[in-house]
Image (cartoon, helix red, strand yellow):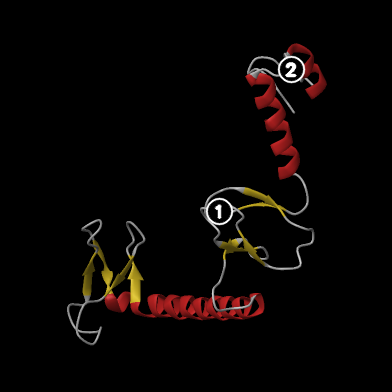
Amino acid sequence: MREKHVDCMFVLQPEEVYAFLQPGTEIYDSYARALFIRFLQNSPGYSECLHCGQGHLYDHPCSDAKRRCLNDKCQKYTCGVHNIPWHEGQSCQEYDADTSRDKDKHTIDNKLSMQRIQGESKACPGCHKMIFRQGDDGYDGCEHMTCEFTLQLATSWEEG
């Protein structure tokens, strides 16, 4: 455990810290607990409940992805594969498939949105925000645009 003061680069090892502490004192017990918690946190199979924060040590690798918190007041489930609250009603494979489809849909939606923005709007030469021409069909109105952000004449719609 690295114990150092802001201005001191000297690192004390746990046995050196214990040499200065009195066994059975509150500070001794707190230090021992901190070392033990750090040891557990670095152990394979350790995870903390995403709901209450209590730490648990599971078999590694854990055979069951659905992990129930052992805290009597919590007892909520976490997915050990995805490290999220348990995806109720779905196996990990089903969750992966849905997530992949959602990601693909968002990618397609983003591409279509960018195509529409590039095809139907112009960039203000001052602030470079994209401006859409107003009108019911998207093409009515004056041939000149004024940027609402900089209030400067942006461009003629026909100029491009």
Q: Residue at x 57, y 67 (%)?
A: 86
Front residue of this view, candidates 145 and 9: 9
Estimate the x, y position of residue 38 in percent, counting from the top left. 71, 37
Front residue of this view, candidates 118 and 66: 66
Front residue of this view, candidates 32 and 123: 32
Estimate the x, y position of residue 54 in percent, counting from the top left. 59, 48
Q: Which image quarter holds the C terminus?
A: bottom left
Does 74 sit left or right of 130 as displayed?
right
SS class of the residue under badge 1?
loop
Q: Residue at x 45, y 81 (%)?
A: 112
Q: Are marks 1 and 2 in contact (CB under 8 Å)?
A: no
Tell me the amino acid under the disc marked 1. Asp
Tell me the amino acid under the disc marked 2. Pro
Q: Residue at x 63, y 18 (%)?
A: 6
> How many numbered marks does the figure carry?
2
Q: Residue at x 72, y 13 (%)?
A: 22
Does 28 sit left or right of 127 as displayed?
right
Name the quadrant containing residue 145: bottom left
Estimate the x, y position of residue 124 in percent, counting from the top left. 32, 63
Name the quadrant containing residue 30: top right
Residue 84 drawn above or below residue 6: below
Give the numbered dot on residue 72: 1
> Which residue lies under the disc numbered 2?
23
Residue 21 drawn above or below residue 38: above
Estimate the x, y position of residue 76 in percent, counting from the top left. 54, 61
Name the quadrant containing residue 35: top right
SS class of the residue under badge 2?
loop
Q: What's the CA distance linking mark 1 and mark 2?
A: 32 Å
Front residue of this view, candidates 99 and 106: 99
Residue 81 drawn above or below residue 25: below
Residue 135 seen anywhere in this rendered image of the structure: yes
